[in-house]
Image: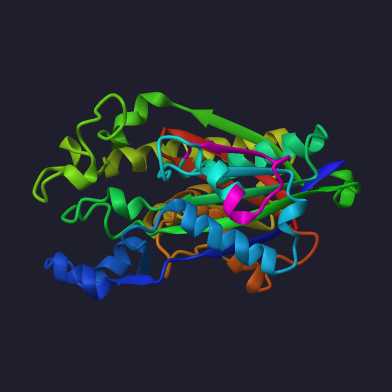
Amino acid sequence: MFAAIRAIEYHLPERILANDELACAFPDWSPQKIADKTGIVERRIAAPGECASDLAFAAAHKLFASGACRPDEVDFLLLCTQSPDYFLPTTACILQDRLGLPTTAGALDYNLGCSGFVYGLSLAKGLIETDQAAKVLLLTAETYSKFLHPHDKSVRPLFGDAAAATLVHRRHDAAPGGFPWIGPFVFGTDGKGMANLIVSGGGMRRPDQSPAASEPDTPASACGHLYMNGPEIFAFTLDAVPKAVQALLARAERTIDEIDLFVFHQANRYMLEHLRDKLQIPHDKFVVAMSHVGNTVSSTIPIALRDSSARQLLPPGKLIMLVGFGVGYSWAATLMRS
């Protein structure tokens, strides 16, 4: 048996934060300068009181409405989020009830950021190909906007809120050529980089600091807001991602020319262009899909896949490389067949 992606849907909050509004907050940046630096024109922002589970619920509901499967057919729910509704209970358990999934279904959260979708595919593949589940609902959902310092222009123009729902299901036939539909995988972790992308307050180590409790003029690095050391993140990415790509190609016994489409985590256009140039990937094989959603963390890859499908870029038989990388440091890459 083989695990394969059956369907992807996503949901965006209603509120649009466009570059015109950001330029008012950062007068030295024009709307065009923000777009040129980031590749982002607008991003969506969760409403006050709107949480990751609300976005995930809406994405899953859209997937069910598409006819991909019914709620009662789901055997396991995986939720990737770093902005859970509560410390406990597990947000996936809340969603099991809200979505009307069977009480026989497994449900768990896992805390990963930009590599989280690829990790989730690996978990779903393991569940299905060891016969523990036939249909896995993989949800990715973040409300990073609630972590952002209002005056931190290194992060506020980048991140948007979103959720994606991906149905991974059991198939008994292999992909053309006898290959698995998803895989192989490569992973990487380097916790020495933890301080370069972090929300340092609000957890058990620094429980007294949270974004809501911080003063507006408190530096992000000294409170419960998201802090990012941009140059260090950039250097890490340019080092780790090409190595991961080459490691995956070696494991799959493929060359880079045999890959039909590359879908990387949509961090920002500047970073993606440097990666594409370093790896010498043709423009027409490299997806950039963030201009109207921003960096949605674990949802960037499924959103890019869904949009690529809508643009007829994923006809049957295509070989697609997915690469997630970022906070942790954590990275992961895999191949999928359309």
Q: Is residue 181 above or below residue 119?
A: below
Q: Is residue 319 above or below residue 228?
A: below
> Which part of the image, by quadrant, shows the N terminus?
top right
Is residue 305 in view from this perspective? Answer: no
Q: Position of residue 12 (x, y in %)?
A: 46, 66
> Which sits in the foreground, 285 or 233?
233
> Which sits in the foreground, 10 or 173?
10
Q: Position of residue 261 (x, y in %)?
A: 64, 58
Seen at 20% across and 51% down, the residue is: 149
- Which quarter of the figure has residue 158? bottom left
Seen at 65% across and 60% down, the residue is: 8
> Which part of the image, by quadrant, shows the C terminus?
bottom right
Horizontal side of residue 193 vs 6, given as left or right: left
- Which quarter of the figure has residue 128? top right
- Coloration mode: rainbow
> Which sits in the foreground, 99 or 137?
99
Residue situated furthest left in the rendering: 217
Is residue 77 in view from this perspective? Answer: yes
Q: Position of residue 13 (x, y in %)?
A: 42, 66
* Residue 110 on the magenta segment: yes
> Which sits in the foreground, 284 or 229?
229
Seen at 68% across and 50% down, the residue is: 101
Q: Position of residue 146 (x, y in %)?
A: 30, 52
Chain part drawn in magenta = 97-112
Seen at 30% across and 72% down, the residue is: 18
* Residue 103 on the magenta segment: yes
Q: Is residue 61 above or below residue 254?
A: below
Disc tally is 0
Horizontal side of residue 133 vs 226, given as left or right: right
